Image (cartoon, grey):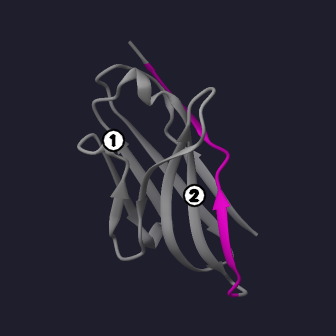
Amino acid sequence: QVQLVESGGGLVPAGGSLRLSCVVSGSIFSINAMGWYRQAPGKQRELVATITSGGGTNGADSVKGRFTISRDNAKNTVYLQMNSLKPEDTAVYYCNVDLLNALRVRLTLWGRGTQVTVSS
């Protein structure tokens, strides 16, 4: 069984920083793309940033220049460094991973989410 565990959310004033982490554990053959999405109250879940197995990144225009996605393949972990946070960044942040499990079955998994609240 494969699990995703997120951490690093919290309450921060506008202009502050947070670093989210998502650790993938279990019977894994390989991890392909990893990413972060967010969902604010009353809104649809939206892409924040993704990173390929080779390190290529993609991000939403709203976070470019402020958020940085990275990964540590040795630790099966993806990070989201969030700087210059704004109240509109308040949301539940979800980790998303595309992988092959030990049986070479392709899975797309979601974490349970971590709350990020930015006060004005």
| Quadrant of residue 98 within the rendered picture | bottom right
Residue 109 sits above or below residue 48 on the image: below
Front residue of 22/74: it is: 22
Q: Residue at x 35, y 44 (%)?
A: 81
Q: Residue at x 23, y 43 (%)?
A: 65
Tell me the quarter of the image containing the N terminus.
bottom right
Chain-order first, disc 2 or disc 1: 1
Question: In the rendered structure, which amino acid carries the disc numbered 2?
Answer: Asn
Q: Residue at x 69, y 84 (%)?
A: 102
Residue 33 sits above or below residue 87 on the image: below
Residue 54, percent across and down? Answer: 36, 76
Residue 68, percent across and down? Answer: 31, 50
Front residue of 23/31: it is: 31
Label 2 or label 1, whichever lies nearer to me, is: 1
Q: Main secondary structure of the magenta part?
A: strand
112 inside magenta stretch: yes
The reply, left or right, for residue 105 in relation to residue 114 is right
Stretch in magenta: 104-118
Say what secondary structure mark 2 lies in: strand
Classed neighbour count for the residue bearing mark 1: other residues with Cα under 10 Å, few (<14), some (14–19), many (≥20): some
Q: Are marks 2 and 1 in contact (CB under 8 Å)?
A: no
1 inside magenta stretch: no
Question: In the rendered structure, which amino acid carries the disc numbered 1?
Answer: Val
Tell me the quarter of the image containing the C terminus.
top left
| Residue 21 numbered tag | none
Q: Which residue is mark 2?
A: 96
The reply, left or right, for residue 119 in relation to residue 7 is left
Q: Which residue is mark 1?
A: 63
The residues tagged by marks 2 and 1 sit, at their Cα atoms, a distance apart of 17 Å
Say what secondary structure mark 1 lies in: helix
Question: How many marks are shown on the rendered structure?
Answer: 2
The reply, left or right, for residue 116 in relation to residue 86 is right
